[in-house]
């Protein structure tokens, strides 16, 4: 399918054969939580509330990714399995807020990608074994 290779499962490292996509718009942030296996959308106001400590779902997710990243690095070292968060920056404020948060969480690696006009990430159900 072009997203996952056909090699046999290597356990924890397989979780990161896919990048983590976070799409930032002017008024919201969209992301797929691989631990819950579902999409999330939060408004700019909700993001600001989360940064102030109110029900910080996105922040908790990023911390979970960091923890998983550390487990993967411990198991595999600095290899191709090192995860990458791809941020699609269509909204300047939401992108800047998100990147400030990501920079504060040790162990997260990100890249900025151009926004695609008809963006659709073909996630399949993932079974996390942690």
Image (spheres, rainbow, N blue to C red):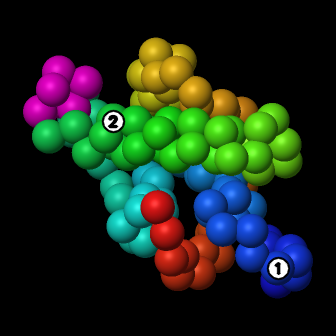
Residue drawn at 44 percent across, 52 percent down: 30
Of 111 and 126, nearer the camera is 126
Q: Is residue 2 above or below residue 83?
A: below
Magenta stretch? 49-54
Cα gap from disc 1 to disc 2, whole angstroms: 32 Å
Q: Is residue 66 left or right of residue 77?
A: left
Q: Left or right: where does residue 128 sit relative to residue 77?
A: left
Residue 28 visible here: no
Return the residue found at the far left: 54
Q: Mark 1 or mark 2: which comes first in sequence?
A: 1
Image x and y of residue 8, in percent: 82, 79
Residue 16, x across and y down, in percent: 67, 57
| Residue sitting nearer the eye, 94 or 101 | 101
**Image location (x, y in percent) of residue 60:** 31, 40
> How crowded is the residue under tag 2: few (<14 C-alpha within 10 Å), some, or many (20+)?
some
Locate residue 73: give its quadrant. Answer: top right
Q: Which residue is mark 2?
A: 59
Horizontal side of residue 14 vs 1, given as left or right: left
Q: Quadrant of the N terminus?
A: bottom right
Query: Residue 105: horizontal and vertical position, in percent?
Result: 47, 23
Residue 111 falls in which quadrant of the image? top right
Q: Confirm whether residue 57 shows in the render.
A: yes
Q: Which residue is mark 1?
A: 8
Q: Secondary structure at mark 2?
A: helix
């Amino acid at each position: 399918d072009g997203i996952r290779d056909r090699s046999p499962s290597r356990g924890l490292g397989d979780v990161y054969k896919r990048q983590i996509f976070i799409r930032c718009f002017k008024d919201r942030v969209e992301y797929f939580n691989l631990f819950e296996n579902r999409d999330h959308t939060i408004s700019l106001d909700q993001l600001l509330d989360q940064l102030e400590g109110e029900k910080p779902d996105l922040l908790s997710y990023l911390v979970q990714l960091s923890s998983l990243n550390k487990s993967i690095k411990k198991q595999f070292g600095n290899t191709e399995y090192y995860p990458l968060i791809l941020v699609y920056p269509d909204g300047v404020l939401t992108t800047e807020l998100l990147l400030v948060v990501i920079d504060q969480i040790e162990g997260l690696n990100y890249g900025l990608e151009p926004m695609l006009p008809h963006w659709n990430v073909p996630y399949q159900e993932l079974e996390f074994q942690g």
